[in-house]
Image (spheres, rainbow, N blue to C red):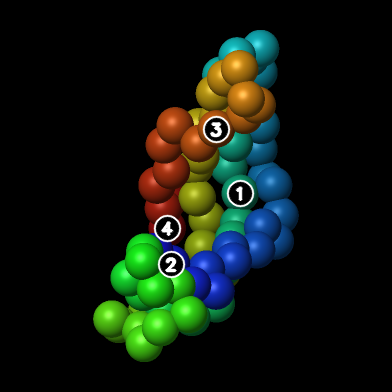
């Protein structure tokens, strides 16, 4: 489980058209976060992952019965 994983979208730089599937280009960043056991989310970290600076990402979103979900995401830069 990831503790304190909270990506921030800084900018959306491009949006493709679609009704049930949409491709976005965006810039995001991540703070540092911990990987912890799912059964002990408040326990000791198994490892700490450093934050990531602002990065351009292409993300594909698909519509589901429960709302939009990420199908794929990859760094462009």
Residue 61 versus residue 28 in the image, above or below = above
Q: Earlier in the sequence, mark 2 or mark 4?
A: 2
Element carrying mark 2: strand
Indicate which label's residue lies in the foreground, 3 or 2.
2
Locate residue 58 relative to residue 49 in the image: left or right: right
Q: Residues within 10 Å of mark 1 (few under 14, many from 20)?
A: many
- Say which residue label 3 marks: 69
How would you rate the neighbour count of disc 4 (Cα within 10 Å): few for under 14, some for 14-19, many for 20 or more? few
Q: Is residue 74 left or right of residue 66?
A: left
Measured from the top left, where is residue 15 in percent x and y?
66, 31
In the foreground, 1 or 23: 1
Q: Residue at x 70, y 61 (%)?
A: 10
CA–CA distance in space, label 3 to label 4: 23 Å
Could you give the CA–CA distance between mark 3 and mark 2, rounded to whole angstroms? 18 Å
Q: Residue at x 42, y 58 (%)?
A: 77
Q: Secondary structure at mark 3?
A: strand
In screen coordinates, is 76 left or right of 6?
A: left
Residue at the disc numbered 4: 77
Instruction: Give the Cα separation between the discs numbered 3 and 1.
Output: 16 Å
Is residue 17 shown above or below 77?
A: above
Q: Which residue is mark 2?
A: 2
Label for residue 26? 1
**Residue depicted at x 61% and y 49%:** 26
Image spot of residue 32 (x, y percent): 48, 80
């Amino acid at each position: 489980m990831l503790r304190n994983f909270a990506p921030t979208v800084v900018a959306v730089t491009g949006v493709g058209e679609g009704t049930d599937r949409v491709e976005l280009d965006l810039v995001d960043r991540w703070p540092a976060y911990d990987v912890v056991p799912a059964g002990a989310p408040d326990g000791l970290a198994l490892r700490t992952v450093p934050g990531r600076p602002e990065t351009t990402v292409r993300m594909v979103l698909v519509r589901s019965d429960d709302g939009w979900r990420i199908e794929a995401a990859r760094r462009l830069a």
